[in-house]
Image (tube, grey):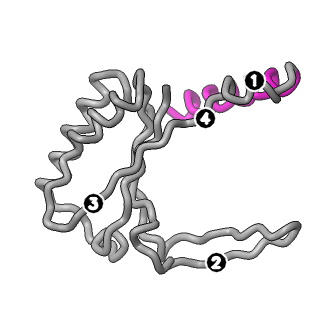
Amino acid sequence: MRFMVLVKATEESEAGVLPTVEELNAMGKFNAELVEAGIMLAGDGLQPSSQGARVRFEGDKRSVIDGPFAETKELIAGFWIIDVKSLDEAVAWVKRVPFNGPEPTEIEIRRVTEAADFAAVMTPEMQAQEDRLREKVEQQAAERS
């Protein structure tokens, strides 16, 4: 099962405060453990919301809302995508994240929806298209490497 691990933003991350050398070293070590365990598929930090935008959909209308966004506690500062056997295993790994600062930090764990989750409504043609798209994405990623 794939899980997206969402690191919630803090006032510091929204202000663009960079981590210390010690914090970067600790996170690098943790990321290496995820890679060595063979469960890390992706992971990165995100720039503050002041450097982002949201697109709002209302019927056929689209509008762009430039950052920053008001509710820091609702924002994401970084993420991992991990492949583990269960939510319990994902929680066990997340408990090891080296966040030890004075400011509270929250991490959300959400299971990634797989194509099989749509089996009841997905036609064979839709499944074939999904397979082709995933294959192309993997090929493009390999070419970028």
* 113 sits to left or right of 69: right
Mark 4 touches mark 3? (CB < 8 Å)? no
- The answer to which of 135 and 12 lies nearer the viewer is 12
- The answer to which of 38 and 71 lies nearer the viewer is 71
Q: Which amino acid does label 3 sit on?
A: Thr
| Residue under the point 28% across and 72% down | 12
Question: Mark 3 — residue?
Answer: 105
Going from the N terminus, do you reach mark 4 or mark 1 first? 4
| Separation of marks 1 and 3 at Cα, in angstroms | 37 Å
- The local secondary structure at tag 4 comes to loop
| Separation of marks 4 and 1 at Cα, in angstroms | 11 Å
| Separation of marks 4 and 3 at Cα, in angstroms | 25 Å
Is the residue 59 above or below the residue 113 in the image? below
Going from the N terminus, do you reach mark 2 or mark 1 first? 2
- The local secondary structure at tag 3 comes to loop
* Disc 3: CA contacts within 10 A as few (<14), some (14-19) or many (>=20): few
The region drawn magenta spans 125-145
| Residue under the point 73% across and 23% down | 131
Going from the N terminus, do you reach mark 1 or mark 3 first? 3
Going from the N terminus, do you reach mark 2 or mark 3 first? 2
Question: Mark 4 — residue?
Answer: 113
Residue 34: quadrant of the picture = top left
Numbered label attached to residue 46? none
Question: Mark 1 — residue?
Answer: 119
Q: What residue type is labelled 4?
A: Thr
Q: Where is residue 87 in the image (x, y as percent from the top left)?
A: 40, 31
- The local secondary structure at tag 1 comes to loop
